[in-house]
Image (tube, rainbow, N blue to C red):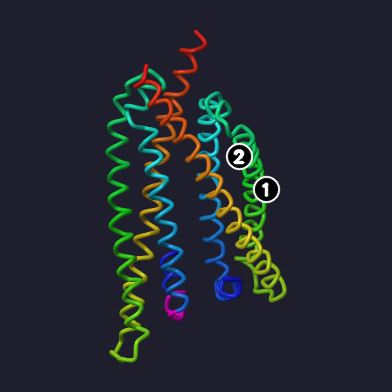
Amino acid sequence: METKTHYKFIQWRDTGGLHEDTTITISDLKFLQDELHFLTDLASEETLEMIYGISHEASAFVAEKLQACQNRVEHLLEAFQLHSNRLQTLLDDTEIPNELEEYKDAHYNLMISAMKLHGDVKKVKQRVFNMLAEVMQKSKEKRSN
Amino acid sequence: MKNITYKMVQLSTPAELHAECVEWLSQLNFNDDEQRFLNELIRNYTVPLIANEAYAAAVKLVSELGAEENELKRLAQRVNTHMNNIEALLGTEKDQREEEGYRETHYYLKLDMHRYTIKYRKTKTELFDRIKKVIRNKKRNTRLS
């Protein structure tokens, strides 16, 4: 369903619209990158130990997951950047057969990857929330004892 | 942006609009969890946050986050009602006027979802920056002592 909707709109979009999609997605991915940095800092063992006096074994696992997300975001950002630059060649005077169609196919695949990545990161974030909430709860109990 | 959004809503099938509502609700649910986590985070960092020279800014930030939490609840209610209305229409004969009506509703919801997302993101960025500063100070103090 989702996929078809996207495809339909991409087919119908002009180069200005494609450019807009790309710009928005790049800005979304950059925000995601900041968010992941923040969570990584927060969940880092050093911080947890220092602030809560607890060394949590789960934190290493979460850190690894966060790093994996971070890598994916970085790769996708690069791909989008290239994709954005390629739009320039679409706008020049040289006519290459099917170039817009090919560009749209690439666009579609990239947009789907971005959507999937956002979904996956959400799952990891949920884990981090749960882990940190638990740590904070424990620390609260410790303080009140 | 406005016209493109409007056109997209006009060109979507009722089933596609319904799918978008499902997506919004899932996003709002996720944000609800995230907000709970952020509140917990603030409670944990309250003392260093307000001990900071930027007391007024920190208070403002907390109240913004609270306002966004309320907005989230209102939006979720609106999306739910709208989604139920679409569902009711899905199985029935096509009624042009009714369809126009829910497309209008959908369009305004879409704009409000967008506005809310941008605002929420801005607040989160600010909160992240403040907490990062607290962590940095804490680390520095620990090293000094």
Where does the image place residue B126, in percent across and percent down from the top left? 53, 43
Quarter holding the C terminus of chain B is top left
Q: Which mark is residue B61?
A: 2
Left or right: A94, with B74 as reference point: left
**Relative to B77, is B110 above or below?**
below
| Chain identity of mark 1 | B
Residue for point 27% across, 38% down: A64
Spatial CA span between label 2 and label 1? 20 Å
Looking at the rendered structure, the kind of residue marked 2 is: Leu
Where does the image place residue B77, in percent across and percent down from the top left? 66, 49
Looking at the rendered structure, the kind of residue marked 1 is: Arg
Tell me, yes or no, whether the highlighted magenta stretch contains residue B93: no
Tell me, yes or no, whether the highlighted magenta stretch contains residue A9: yes
Q: Mark 2 vs mark 1: give the one in front.
A: 2
Question: Which residue occupies the extreme top position in the image?
Answer: A145
Magenta region: which residues? A8-15
Local secondary structure at mark 1: helix
Our reading of the magenta stretch's main secondary structure is helix
Quarter holding the N terminus of chain B is bottom right
Where does the image place residue A82, in percent across and percent down from the top left? 30, 69
Marked residue nearer the N-terminal end (2 or 1)? 2
* Quarter-of-image position of residue A39: top left
Residue for point 28% across, 46% down: A68
Residue for point 43% across, 73% down: A19
Residue for point 61% across, 36% down: B62
**Relative to A118, is B18 above or below?**
below
Disc 1: which residue: B74
The mark total stands at 2
